[in-house]
Image (tube, rainbow, N blue to C red):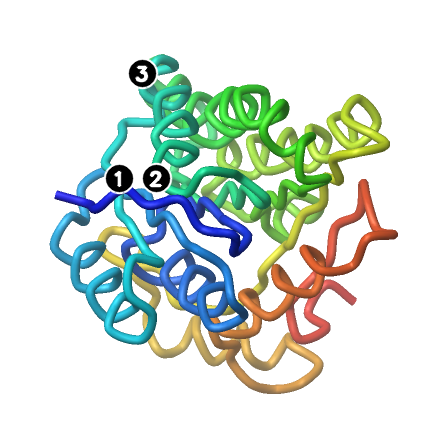
Amino acid sequence: MNEVKTQEAPAALVTGAGRRIGAAIAEHLHQAGFQVVVHYHHSREAAEKLIEKLNEKRPASAYCIQADLAVRAQAQRLITDTVDYCGRLDLLVNNASLFLKTAPDFVADDVLQQLFVTNVQAPLWLSQAAYTHLDKQQGAIINITDTHAERPLRGYSVYCQTKAALAMQTQSLALEFAPRVRVNAVAPGAIIWPENENTLNDTKKKQIIEKTLLKCHGNPLYVAQAVLALAQNPFITGQTLRVDGGRGL
């Protein structure tokens, strides 16, 4: 059970933060002085280990909350619970995402819905629910998109479409939420290799690195650094920062 305490430190909610890029973002923000709420759906053990680690460094500064973001009421409850724990909300990082392969000629309706609800609708629900709390702090929203929002990836057509929609959502909400709430995005490139059915063989990994100008694979910390930079800069909104080693060129 999380201990509820109100603190003066700024508060950040990072969705899908139990593992991988989300965990790196949460840890980096915490290191920068934020209270951090780690959202998870299935990765309970990883999320609990992460907040235990963070709270050892600074007691009562990190919390974890489970929610299925495909359910609008749970997404809205996540914002309410975050404010209850921290007493405020300064930064929302919409990192949670589904990365699913789809056939070129047919996509089942349930898969289509899963991708769009998780990657597009859930960030919108969270952003709308967070707006009044962020407005009080002149806070920010940062969406984690993808370099493939601009350049499609074969076999992942619907996923790419959802990230393109999230990129436009970033610009649209920046316009709607100005002047007190800034909305930006970070678009990772080859930062962390995909898992499970999306796993790449060594040949494919080498090809990706060869197409990257800096000739190396990225690191989740690089995305976390970009998130913090956008969160701290008060004169940037409606922008997408690529963290792709130059591969987009």
* Label 1 close to label 3 by CB (< 8 Å): no
Measuring 22% from the left and 55% from the top, which residue is drawn there? Answer: 47
Q: Residues within 10 Å of mark 3 (few under 14, many from 20)?
A: few
Quadrant of the rendered structure where residue 30 is? bottom left
Measuring 45% from the left and 38% from the top, which residue is drawn there? Answer: 87
Q: CA distance from mark 1 to mark 3?
A: 26 Å
Q: Residues within 10 Å of mark 2 (few under 14, many from 20)?
A: many
| Left or right, 125 with reference to 74 | right
Three-letter code, disc 1: Ile
Three-letter code, disc 2: Tyr
- Residue 36 is situated, as x and y percent measured from the top left of the image, at 41, 54
- Tell which tag, 1 or 3, sits nearer the viewer: 1
Look at the picture and state if 236 lies above or below 212.
Answer: above
Circle nearer the N terminus (3, 2) = 2
Location of mark 1 (residue): 65
Between 34 and 26, the one lying in front of the other is 34
- Tell which tag, 3 or 2, sits nearer the viewer: 2
Secondary structure at numbered mark 1: strand
Q: Which numbered marker is on residue 85?
A: 2
Location of mark 3 (residue): 110
Measuring 67% from the left and 47% from the top, which residue is drawn there? Answer: 185
Look at the picture and state if 106 lies above or below 52.
Answer: above
* Label 2 close to label 1 by CB (< 8 Å): yes
Circle nearer the N terminus (1, 3) = 1
Q: CA distance from mark 2 to mark 1?
A: 10 Å
Look at the picture and state if 231 lies above or below 170.
Answer: below
How many numbered circles does the render carry?
3
